[in-house]
Amino acid sequence: MDYLEFKITCSEEFRDILVAELSAIGFDSFLESESGLDAYAAEEGFDRLGFEEIIARYKDLADIQLTEGILPKTNWNEEWEKNYDPIPVDDLVYVRASFHPPVKGFKHEILINPKMSFGTGHHATTFLMLRHQGEIDHQGKRVLDVGSGTGILAIMAALLGASEIEAFDIDEWCVENGNENFASNHLDIKMGLGTIREVKPPGIFDIVLANINKNILLDEMALYADLIPSGGFLLLSGFYESDIEDILAAAKKHNLGKVKSQTKNDWAALVLKKS
């Protein structure tokens, strides 16, 4: 079966929204790019009208530009293996695929076979989140991973000693891939499907992780805050350094104060604490 390939240039804050919208009309594979994303759908049964409606809806808002092509039947694993390199995060963790050999000198190792899901560790936001996790005590803590992607942050939480982990994503492909990665790392975690409002994670969480985008983080800030006890932590990323003040202003309304921030390639990550 041939696949249609759409190379989409768009504003960063609309990337996840486009993934969700396109997933709903049959797109089943996505790859991050520096300028947006590459989206893939089977040519057979392609919903052309639905696709055009989505692009028209967000074209001006997201500053969309796209090119379309046909990708012959592809061995997806072979394609991403060509461009997937291991990622060292300081001496904390070595993130590798199953076809890479292990490397000594790191406290932890994570196996990620990302296929077409986001969250391989290559993106600056994931790298920063992993680094921040290494600076927070996870031992015996309940952890919530919002918008889990490949499940990499949930896996990191488990390696750091979290006693209970909840994870979910809005994309069925991510859920499938995330569960595969949990199994590869010998973890008894099951990723749920849906938004935080749909999943309604039960109870209180000592640490909430959310690497999504600015708009969603602002929209869901109150929900995160309600799940965190006094003294609990909220780790955020998925936004630019220039967005930090907007994020902090929204967090302050819910008694969440800045502990620290880090940046990489203009991207930012925050550690917030509930007072």
Image: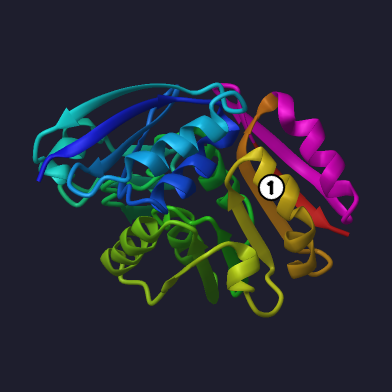
Is 200 in front, or is 203? 200
Question: Along the horizontal axis of the image, is 262 left or right of 65?
Answer: right
Which residue is at 31% across, 30% downward? 6
Image position of 219 (left or right of 87): right
Q: In the image, is 113 to the left or to the right of 117?
A: left
Q: Residue furthest front?
A: 49
Q: Residue at x 59, y 23 (%)?
A: 60
Q: Is residue 160 visible?
A: no
Q: Which residue is mark 1?
A: 217
The part of the chain drawn in magenta is 242-268
| Magenta stretch encompasses residue 102 | no
Indicate whether 200 appears above or below 267: below
Q: Amino acid at mark 1?
A: Leu
Q: Is 265 located above or below residue 43 in the figure?
A: above
Front-lying residue, 105 or 135: 135
Picture residue at 9% right of the left edge, 46% below the top: 1
Q: Is residue 68 above or below residue 184?
A: above
Residue 261 sits inside the magenta stretch: yes
Residue 103, percent from left and from top: 25, 45
**Residue at the spot x=74%, y=40% of the render?**
260
Of 170 and 162, nearer the camera is: 170
Please tell me which residue lies in front, 209 or 169. Answer: 169
User: Residue 240, how many percent across, how many down?
Assistant: 64, 28
